[in-house]
Image (cartoon, grey):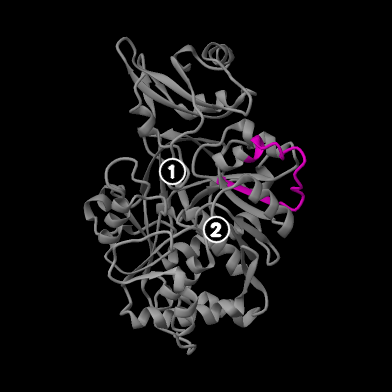
Amino acid sequence: MRNAGLGSWPHRRARMAPTREAFVHDGVTTTYGELAVRTTRLAWRLRELGVRAGDRVAYLGPNHPSFAETMFATHQLGAVFVPLNFRLTAAEAGYQLADCGAHVLVHAPSFAPDHPRAVSLDGYEEWLSGGSGEVLDEPVDISAPALILYTSGTTGRPKGAVLTHANLLWNTFNLMIGIDLAADDVALVAAPLFHVAALAQTLLPTFVKGGLSVLTPRWDVDACLDLVEKHRVTLMFGVSTMFADVVASPRWPSADLSSLRVLLCGGAAVPDALIRAYQDRGLVFCQGYGLTETAPGATFLEAADSVARAGSAGTPVFFGDVRLSDVGEIEVQGPNVTPGYWNAPEATAAAFTPDGWFRTGDIGRVEDGHLRVLDRLKDMFISGGENVYPAEVENALAAHPDVAEVAVVGVPDDRWGEVGRAFVRPRDGAEPGGDELRAFLVPRLAKYKIPRYFDVVTSLPRTGSGKVLKPALRRLPL
């Protein structure tokens, strides 16, 4: 094939195992053979709308087989796929569509975007069926852009990180080396596919191996547990919050999790207590570290070390390198690292060191070759001249039996410059007070690290990728 990119994957997999199931969604399965035909028909339909190599095709909607079909069809044409966060406001989505210059937008019926070439999934099946079945084989080099993924945008306008076909291919290699992915694995894709980890750490590697991806449109604990039991799920990626929700569920003690072979967690620091909860159930809980810009895996903690090194983000991935700067910032280099940001040369230049390493903005520490992520550089605050890493405080508070989840930020203080403010989401039925939580921390943390303020909340604000939106917390009045 002349197409060396992701667009060739459906046909490569279909010629090996056409009857094997690729996706199941809402009880409906799609085989690899069916998927190859569907993506070809969709590619012809996109071509009829004028899509050519290098053009951008956007997608707006929850997890669904049409997400993967649109992505692979876009890549068959040598075009660039742009998955948008379906939780965005119309203005936010409009900015990203304009910024990337999307030629076509495929969207779920629940969205009504203002775009001249918008294709609603409401009439998707009929529209797709009218496409030609003749196989397309456009020349696509693996160095060409494959995705534009917009960062969370916690400060200022979000930037579009460009990932090439090669970036995604090397990340797939790294993931398969890290967890020994097998052809009979069943992956639960419950995190949103516009999040690079859901796409590149579960769906794509599972696809390459010919496994089954169980797609669910939204995160729901009961639905997740039902799907794990029904489909005998072996692999799952989630952010810390998702795994915390499962442990907090009344079904946690009795849920059948015997099929789960490995749990992948990333996106933010994971409390040790949460890791232990899964390990106590005999489950392999592997934490990794990465960013959208690293496609995303930069480090990974393999199963053999998951107990002894619990809390560590592991070692650099097989095809990749990690180092710390003089101030402890984590820097990454490798074939999985983005070439830069879409139409943003200044942001691209600022993101790399003079010798070509990507600056992550995270602070870390290396212990016997294993990386421990301390916090975001911008989240660290200084109290009385001492550095405080909120992730460390959060980890300590998460060990309290009444705490389901916690986020800590620095807030201004006349005497100390900044002090900690903890936002605590309690477990169902629990009502921990500030004095109780403070007393719990006294033997565990230095005095300057203990938050001055404790707020008990029912939920925490989040970005589209599930990370806690700390700038929103900092803006809340005391």
Q: Is residue 247 magenta?
A: yes
Specify few, some or many for label 1: CA neighbours under 10 Å numbering under 14, 14-19, or 20 or more.
some
Q: Is residue 38 above or below residue 302?
A: below
Left or right? Give the position of 376 relative to 246. Answer: left
Splitting the image into 4 quarters, where does residue 83 fall? Answer: bottom left
Which of the two residues, 76 or 402, is positioned nearer the viewer here?
Answer: 402
Report the amino acid beneath label 2: Asn
Splitting the image into 4 quarters, where does residue 180 fall? Answer: bottom right
- N-terminal label among 1 and 2: 2
Q: Is residue 281 above or below residue 419?
A: below
Specify few, some or many for label 2: CA neighbours under 10 Å numbering under 14, 14-19, or 20 or more.
many
Pinpoint residue 416: horizontal percent, then vertical percent.
Answer: 34, 12
Range of residues picked out in magenta: 246-265
Q: Residue at x 71, y 59 (%)?
A: 231
Pinpoint residue 219: horizontal percent, then vertical percent.
Answer: 56, 49
**In the image, farthest residue toward the left:** 346
Q: Which numbered circle lies on residue 174?
A: 2
Q: Which residue is mark 1?
A: 323
Q: Secondary structure at mark 1?
A: strand
